[in-house]
Amino acid sequence: MVKPATAAANRGPASHLFSTPLFCLLSLLITLVFSGTLAAAEKPKVRAVTAFVRLEPANYQEQVREALTMLRRAKAAFEQVGYEVQSVRIATQPFPEYTRGMTREAALAFLREYDALAKREGFDASIGPAMLEDGDDPAAVELLHDLFTGEGVLNASLTVAGEDGVRWKAVGEAAKLIHYWAHHDPSGLANFGFAATALVPPNTPFFPAAYHRGPGREFALALQSANVVAEAFAGVAEFAQARQRLAEALGAHAVAIERVALGIEKESGWGYRGIDLSPAPLKEVSIGGAVEKLTGAPFGSSGTMTAAALITEVLRSLPVKRAGYSGLMVPVLEDTVLAQRWSDGTLTLDALLAYSAVCGTGLDTIPLPGDTTVEQLERIIGDMASLAVKLRKPLSARLMPIAGKKAGDRTEFNDPFLTNAVIQPLP
């Protein structure tokens, strides 16, 4: 699952920053921009700088070192102009491609070594989908049964729908895997690092869905900008004004951030693949609270659908290169307001699927009763996948059944990325 970067991610003196005249000029231009309106406004964080590496087991440590050199310099470059970077990440091609030909034991040993390297070096790691195409061998899913624990940092996914429709074999495998982890990981966190994905494109920087199919040496950015949305919506009387304020505020930051990214591309030789503009929240920095500023009602009430559509419309109008979902994210357990609305029963599975028709990720960090069956998980994942196929849009499901907990109980996570909520009965 996503863990905070360690101090190792900050390694390297300031003299290691990109230091050519072009980059210095870029820094000066952005500094001048911030002397105006942006200086006084809420700034987003860069949630992640994600490098895409075509991992080769024979020399993976050297590949990781090269990627981390770029990532750490990029982190410093963003922070030099006032944008905090929360994490640096590496995503690979689907892991069955580089474990093919290994015995089960050798593949597990390699992936555990990679997990240990990620923890030592302070980066978050995604090993991509266990099944990407409908005909892929589900044996790779079996590897994940033994690999994931609440203590690791690896993320993975399973593609349950594509342009060819819902892949029901993969739906079943995802449901079985989620059910297995729910009953074999006492922390309840193993499912935090896994998503069933539908039509999620390569080069998505948000975890757990991140993967790529190309030659590597590319990077993309993810934002944490719920605070910018909240500021834009504060005191707004009508939706048209809210749209304009959000476009101006978030657009200015997106353009400034992309300028830094283009400088990194120029100086490092790593290709820039875009920004996932989804305004991710983090606990008290709440996208649920931001929407409530606009609607004047609890998230889940009438008006929420309109607000969700408005935010996504603005994101898709911004003049930058987009990646990933680039829509409203509604991660229940990563947002204190959303968690409260879930606990109140104002926000439901059906409501989240309805909002997904006009916004972002689908069903994200959903707490479920521990006795949720494989068949019930299949139906939930199938609904998400069917909606993604119908609308031709990227969606995913990150479902978290909590062993030993029933409807009415409260989750008990102690994690920097998760808040807690009351578990609701399944419909």
Image: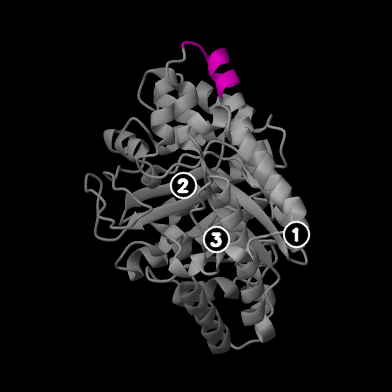
Looking at the rendered image, the disc whose residue lies closer to the viewer, 3 or 2, is 3
Camera-nearest label, 2 or 1: 1
SS class of the residue under badge 1?
helix
Contact (CB < 8 A) between labels 3 and 1? no
Report the side of 173 relative to 392 (left or right).
left
Instruction: Please tell me which residue is depicted at 58% across the width and 35% down the height of the picture.
Output: 34
Q: Nearer the viewer, residue 287 or 301?
A: 287
Q: CA distance from mark 2 to mark 1?
A: 36 Å
Viewed as shown, does residue 258 lie left or right of 292? right
Judging depth in this view, the residue of 16 and 287 nearest the camera is: 16
Q: Which residues are magenta?
A: 237-245
- Position of the C terminus, as image quadrant, is top left
SS for callout 2: strand
Residue that numbered label 2 is attached to? 364
Where is mark 1, residue-wise?
Answer: 267
Residue drawn at the location 50% of the way across and 49% of the way down: 84
Residue at the (69%, 29%) spot, across then down: 317
Residue 96, horizontal then vertical, whole percent:
65, 74
